[in-house]
Amino acid sequence: MLTRPASPADAEAITEIYNQGIEDRIGTFETEPRTVEQILAWFDAVGPLGRFPIVVTEDEGRIVAYAATSAYHSRACYRGIAEFSVYVARDRRGQGAGRAALTGLIEAATKAGFWKLLSRVFAENVASRRTCAAVGFREVGTNLKHAKLDSAWRDVVVVERLIEENID
Ligand SMILES: CC(C)(COP(=O)(O)OP(=O)(O)OC[C@H]1O[C@@H](n2cnc3c(N)ncnc32)[C@H](O)[C@@H]1OP(=O)(O)O)[C@@H](O)C(=O)NCCC(=O)NCCS
């Protein structure tokens, strides 16, 4: 498997993988599927030439996962913090692609100068919690009843990883 910066040519594969994640109701509060045009607009806003890295993981020419950073907060003091997400194609989960994508994203975020990555993971999302732990994230704590998904309150675990190279 190879992880590399994403490009607009990857938008279709990213859309498909993200929409599977939305459908599966395990990784995000989002419920509306995305279109390729929306993903391309996202690329324009934050994509490969922007401040927030996005990476894809390929296996034999097929994109099997992606991971992306996004803005954490508009206050200047938080400029070195990014939120992240990671999604693996449904038929390729549990085969190392999530770990590969997240590892590549951490490398890209390190080069981009971020000092911390963070996210919120559904408490029951064992695969995501294990993947985060495997690449050095710690669990900060749990936000109880953070929001509703399909009318049910969900708890989320806050995870963070310091990037020591960018902390002086
Ligand atoms: C969560 C997700 C990104 C993990 O990626 P993955 O490719 O399935 O995971 P990997 O094969 O790289 O495994 C990484 C670690 O997690 C563990 N793991 C993976 N799936 C697991 C599962 N279902 N149950 C328990 N542990 C699991 C692996 O054993 C491995 O841990 P180890 O190195 O300690 O053995 C992927 O399953 C996915 O896309 N899920 C749906 C969307 C989602 O939940 N995204 C996260 C949003 S925060």
Image (cartoon, rainbow, N blue to C red):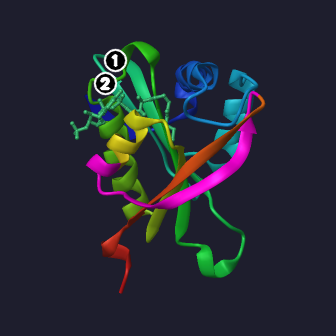
Residue 127 screen position, x and y as percent: 38, 34
Which stretch is magenta?
Answer: 133-150
The amino acid type found where label 1 is placed reads Gly
Left/right of residue 77 with respect to residue 38 in the rendered view:
left
Left/right of residue 167 with respect to residue 60 in the rendered view:
right
Query: Between marks 2 and 1, how big is the CA–CA gap?
Result: 19 Å
Left/right of residue 127 with respect to residue 150 in the rendered view:
left
Q: Nearer the viewer, residue 77 or 120?
A: 120
Asked if labels 1 and 2 touch by Cβ distance under 8 angstroms, the answer is: no
Mark 1 falls on what kind of element? loop
Mark 2 falls on what kind of element? loop
Q: Is residue 113 visible?
A: no
The amino acid type found where label 2 is placed reads Gly
Compared to residue 129, the image places residue 33 above or below, namely above
- The image quadrant of residue 63 is top left
| Label ID, residue 79 | none
Is ligand 1 within 8 Å of the beta carbon of the residue shown at mark 2? yes
Task: Check if residue 149 falls in the magenta segment.
Answer: yes
Q: Which residue is found at the position 49% from the left and 36% from the top?
A: 124
Q: Which residue is found at the position 36% from the left and 57% from the top?
A: 137
Compared to residue 95, the image places residue 133 above or below, namely below
- The image quadrant of residue 111 is bottom left
Q: Looking at the rendering, in which quadrant would you find the C terminus?
A: bottom left
Crowd rating for badge 2 (residues with CA inside 10 Å; few <14, some 14–19, many 20+): few
Of the two numbered discs 2 and 1 on the same chain, state the one appearing first in sequence. Answer: 1
| Label ID, residue 61 | 1
Label 2 sits on residue: 94
Task: Check if residue 3 falls in the magenta segment.
Answer: no
Q: Residue furthest bottom?
A: 168
Is ligand 1 within 8 Å of the beta carbon of the residue shown at mark 1? no
